[in-house]
Amino acid sequence: MKKLSRREFLRLASNSLLGLGGLLGLGGVIRFLSYDMDPAPPSEYDLGPAADFPKVSRTLLLHIPAMLIHDNDGFLAFSLVCSHLGCTIEPTEGGFECPCHGSRYDKRGLVTRGPSRLPLKRLRVETDESGHIILHMS
Amino acid sequence: MNQHQLPESTTRVTDVARRLQASLIAIGAFLLIGASLLMSGTVNAARDRDPTATVTLIPEPTPTFDMDRLASPEVPEIRSQVDEGALLYWGVCMACHGDRGQGFTAEWQWGAFGEDGDCWQSGCHGSDYFEGGFEIPRDLVFPPLSAAGTLGRFENAQQLYDYLVEMMPWWNPGSLGPEKAWQATAYLLKMRGTLPAGLVLSGANASAVPVHRRVEIPQGQFAGLLVFIGVLAAAMIAWTARGSIAHAVHHPSAEVPAGRRAKRPDFFAHLHAPTIPAMQARWRYTLGAGGMSVFLSLVLVVTGLLEMFYYVPTPEKAAISVQTITTLVPFGAFVRNLHYWSAQLLVIAAVVHLARVIYTGAYAAPRRFNFLLGLALLVIVVLLDFTGYVLRWDEGVRWALTAGTNLLKSVPWVGGSLYEFVVGGSAPGPAALVRFYSWHIIALSLACAVVMIWHLFRVRRDGGISTAPPAQRETTARITRSELLRREVLGMFVGGLVLLILSVWVPAPIAPPIRSNTIMEADSGAPWFFLWVQQLLRLGDPFLLGVLFPSALVVLLGAMPYLFVGIKQNELGRWFPRSGKVVQLLFTIVAVLVLALTLLSLVNTP
């Protein structure tokens, strides 16, 4: 191996130290930018007393946005976020239509027309001890 | 024990005995009075009770209740804010809000207080309370504090503090005072698990700390910064050593391998003239201030860009977002400090550069126009600093914001429209903040960049930073641009290290968000580079002293090269040329005046 001259050594040392400093600085910048300013949306919603949602009813919950269905089998809910690219879908006669790219879903949230491929996301519904409907988002 | 101290200690013993006697009598009397009051209390309570009300049964103390829960919390000898808060909570808040912040639950009520659990019946807090006690309305709710979903009306620690300091404890609102209210706030957040570890709450950070969301302050940042500084310092040493060796070896052309083209200057070298007069490139001639200003400007651009990722230019959110950057964002305080210190040092570097130009006669023709460009840069930098200062939108800048904008109204004829142009309304609000923001990040920054490039271009066009005297022009004492570049990088290293050290150890000022219903804080004032104007404003007419006089000083400085004779040929390129005496004297007078007014202002501020 060729012996390093003093000059070459210092050149190597200063360049690698500068490179290391630059990498450290870059790492710091990445960490700086990693902070989440806005809190995550709630993981669950309290929809109030179950009695507010009579049997065989469909309730549009636009603030979530979600649809709560109460049929003979009990409560059922799904998200109104289009599974294609996340627009909020609109209720139509036969089900739902996405205003962005025209995906269509039936009343049970299943795809009837593309480009969307996946059905609407099902949300877990629970009734707590005080009789309130709790909607779980995950 | 020492013999001579015996008599003294015996008198102390009798003294103690006497006191013991007195306190025994006092305790006995207290018990007697207390017992009689207690009896009358139950009698009265029984009489006052609504016969239709359901009788509350007093259950036996829950056997499972662990009486250790009533013990004073264990805190270390050196108590932090939150430790003090734990003691305070135990002493003041716990009785009603529970030992875990669970609220006045039945379990707590009957477990902790046993047969005294009915606070209204036993006469403590009923309508016929003991002397020094107080009545609690039967329907008063003692809310739980720690569970998820509680304290719903508060978003951040500042709001919780504001409520506590004014409304708590319930029976003596406002008696806590700021220090104890902060301690209590810190302890409540700790119970809720939302107090960032190691954070001491104050008005300068509480708005950023959420009541409902757990935030972690990443630890180990300080160590990371030290490593960063260490690596850069080592790089500087290695780089300097390498440069001095390269300097000693006089034939760099021998390094070029045969057959390859000789190395051509790179971009950075190309920004410089091929050679520079050695005498006028020395540190003691340039002071490195112009180059330092360019370097600081670059740091400001980078750190400013980073801050823009989190800063929110609305009156409600601005101060909170600054607190978020400073308190919660990883390395946020460091980035903000870097921006702050670069800005402060830039004002100083620019003024030093101006002084160097004046005292070396470098303002004279053909550099008169570039002198004007430099002066314009100084004004832009000061405006940038001022707008950046105002963007904090907290109590610390309220004076500058109010007085600074109202000063515009004092301008005859156009004052009103000038004010509306800057503020965008009748008082500083959302429009004013967005305008200051736009001026700061775009308009003034862009102007600064353009004038700076023009300024640097004119240095080349005018034949370097100064003209050498005729006697030196023929000599070969010139340095190459690579040597100049080396000196510039060295200056950047030194300046950068000073900046890093300042930013790690000296925090930039910050204050609670502006609230319109409070009195301005005493330490709210003009930024330091405007203290001289603040002092002038104390002396009389705002337009004359606050607008006209400072502008006149700038105009005078700009006109000097055009009003007075240039520098004699043989006095060029050195300090204090005799032919520039008048200009030097005038500048000195202006500088001393500004300095004296600044000092006077500092003395006047309590």
Image (spheres, helix red, strand yellow):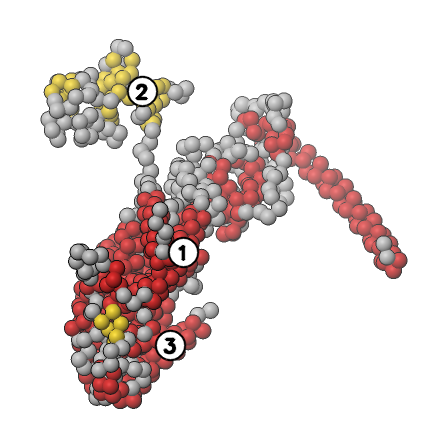
Picture quarter containing residue B392? bottom left
Rendered view: B55 above or below B130: above
Say whether residue A97 is visible. Answer: no
CA neighbours of label 2 inside 10 A, class few (<14), some (14 to 19), many (20+): some
Q: Under tag 3, what secondary structure?
A: helix
Q: How many marks?
A: 3
Rendered view: B524 above or below B165: below
Disc nearest the viewer among 1 and 3: 1
Q: Under tag 1, what secondary structure?
A: helix
Q: CA distance from mark 1 to mark 3?
A: 38 Å
Q: Amino acid at mark 3?
A: Leu
Residue topped by disc 3 = B595
Instruction: Provide the chain ID for the residue under circle 2.
Output: A
Q: Nearer the viewer, residue A2 or B363?
A: A2
Disc nearest the viewer among 1 and 2: 1
Residue topped by disc 1 = B234
> Going 32% across and 63% down the picture, which residue do you hit?
B246
Rendered view: A90 above or below B567: above
Residue B270 place in picture, x, y as percent? 19, 64
Q: Amino acid at mark 2?
A: Arg
Q: Nearer the viewer, residue A59 or B399?
A: B399
Residue A7 place in picture, x, y as percent? 35, 58
Picture quarter containing residue A75? top left
Residue topped by disc 2 = A124
CA neighbours of label 3 inside 10 A, class few (<14), some (14 to 19), many (20+): some
Q: Quadrant of the N terminus of chain B?
A: bottom right
Residue B122 place in picture, x, y as percent? 62, 32
> Going 40% across and 56% down the picture, which residue do you hit?
B234
Q: CA distance from mark 3 to mark 2?
A: 70 Å
Say whether residue A83 is visible. Answer: yes
CA neighbours of label 1 inside 10 A, class few (<14), some (14 to 19), many (20+): some
